[in-house]
């Protein structure tokens, strides 16, 4: 299919700017001071065609939008064995709920914080520095460009992430987490602090949609089976306790983020990303959700849109 032009995306941005609800996340200073008026959209086809609105080059931290890609790297680096260590079922609860699977001590899925702490610990590397390097290299391959970490955000995520520390200690006590709790939180904090823009994040989504091959660079980043598994879990768990409502209305596998980012993957078709910091009560960008609704309806992207 032909993706929308930059002019089409400018019109889309103007339409969603009218949505004025939502609040900034205030868990760390960088998120609390984000520009509430920032709105950008980018779309990348699986043929490598890119379209982006103005401000699509404004950088922001990945935060929870990193979770699908940590899951992908963990699956690739463990030859799929990561699925023995983390569940894949939706929880119906908040992203930072202090909850593990009953009887197994596993995180319920890789899209909540407990799951991301676990998958980050499974990425190849003998220590924190090695896992940090592997994650940054892998995320850069997904984006098709060299990415970098905002060290101030990484430090704040590590120092102020009390619930993440609690989750890591809980998993250690259950025998699920094999590295120290502080090591797990440190690696995940740096992954959340990786800087992208809407254009790069859309390429990352398109790489998953393209079966693990970056459609811009042509590099195979993860095996096709890994991309399939990741996109499947994005569909069921990517918008936390709003995932069911999201799939009913939007019908596109997606991952939300407290930075206001959304990354979407339509298998075999395109990847898309939006950024707009004000969030609804479930931690999803208000304007990003509105943009996704419009794109899904006008481009016919809903996974269950053709039933007859």
Image (tube, grey):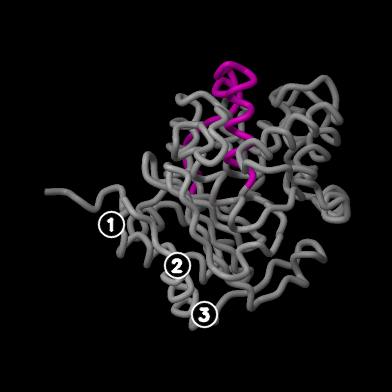
Task: Tell me the element at label 2.
Answer: helix
Say if 196 sits above or below 101 in the image. Answer: below
Which residue does the numbered mark 2 point to in the structure image?
A: 291
Q: Secondary structure at mark 1?
A: loop
Query: On the picture, is 168 further left or further right than 93?
Result: right
Res. 190 visible in picture:
yes
Dot 2: few (<14), some (14–19), or many (≥20) neighbours within 10 Å?
A: many
Q: Looking at the picture, does residue 74 appear above or below residue 21?
A: above
- The answer to which of marks 2 and 1 sits earlier in the sequence is 2
Quadrant position of residue 232: top left
Name which quarter of the figure residue 100 lies in.
top right
Q: In front: 58, or 108?
A: 58
Percent position (x, y) of residue 146?
A: 73, 42
Q: Dot 1, crowdedness within 10 Å: few (<14), some or many (≥20)? A: few
Query: Closer to the N terminus: mark 3 or mark 1?
Result: 3
Q: Residue at x 43, y 42 (%)?
A: 46
| Whole-number angstrom distance, CA of label 2 to CA of label 3 | 10 Å
Alpha carbon separation for disc pair 3 and 1: 22 Å
Residue at (39% x, 52% y) in the render:
244
The answer to whether residue 236 is visible is no
Q: Position of residue 213 (x, y in %)?
A: 51, 32
Magenta region: 66-93
* Residue placed most toward the observer, 97 or 24: 24
Contact flag, marks 3 and 1 (Cβ < 8 Å): no
Q: Is residue 185 left or right of residue 263?
A: right
* Residue position for label 3: 17
Residue at the image point whose x is 54% and y is 23% from the top: 83
Q: Is residue 77 magenta?
A: yes
Residue 159: horizontal and vertical position, in percent? 88, 51
Q: Determine which residue is flagged by label 1.
A: 300
């Amino acid at each position: 299919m032909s993706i929308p032009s930059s002019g089409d995306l400018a019109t889309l941005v103007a339409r969603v700017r009218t949505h004025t609800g939502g609040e900034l996340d205030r868990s760390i200073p960088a998120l609390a001071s984000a520009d509430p008026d920032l709105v950008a959209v980018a779309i990348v086809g699986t043929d490598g065609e890119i379209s982006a609105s103005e401000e699509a080059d404004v950088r922001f931290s990945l935060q929870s939008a990193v979770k699908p890609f940590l899951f992908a790297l963990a699956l690739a680096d463990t030859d799929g064995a990561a699925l023995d260590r983390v569940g894949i079922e939706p929880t119906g609860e908040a992203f930072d709920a202090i909850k593990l699977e009953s009887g197994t001590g596993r995180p319920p899925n890789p899209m909540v914080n407990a799951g991301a702490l676990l998958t980050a610990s499974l990425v190849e590397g003998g220590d924190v520095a090695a896992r940090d390097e592997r994650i940054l290299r892998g995320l850069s391959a997904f984006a098709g460009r060299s990415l970098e970490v905002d060290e101030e955000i990484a430090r704040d995520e590590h120092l102020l992430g009390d619930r993440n520390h609690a989750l890591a200690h809980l998993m250690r006590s259950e025998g699920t987490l094999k590295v120290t709790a502080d090591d797990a939180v440190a690696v995940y904090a740096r992954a959340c602090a990786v800087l992208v823009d809407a254009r790069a994040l859309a390429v990352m989504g398109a790489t998953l949609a393209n079966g693990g091959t970056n459609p811009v660079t042509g590099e195979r980043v993860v095996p096709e089976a890994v991309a399939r598994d990741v996109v499947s879990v994005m569909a069921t768990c990517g918008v936390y306790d709003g995932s069911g409502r999201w799939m009913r209305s939007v019908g596109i596998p997606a991952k939300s983020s407290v930075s206001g980012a959304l990354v979407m993957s339509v298998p075999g078709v395109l990847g898309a990303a939006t950024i707009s910091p004000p969030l609804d009560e479930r931690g999803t960008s208000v304007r990003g959700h509105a943009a996704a609704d419009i794109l899904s309806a006008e481009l016919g992207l809903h996974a269950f849109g053709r039933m007859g």
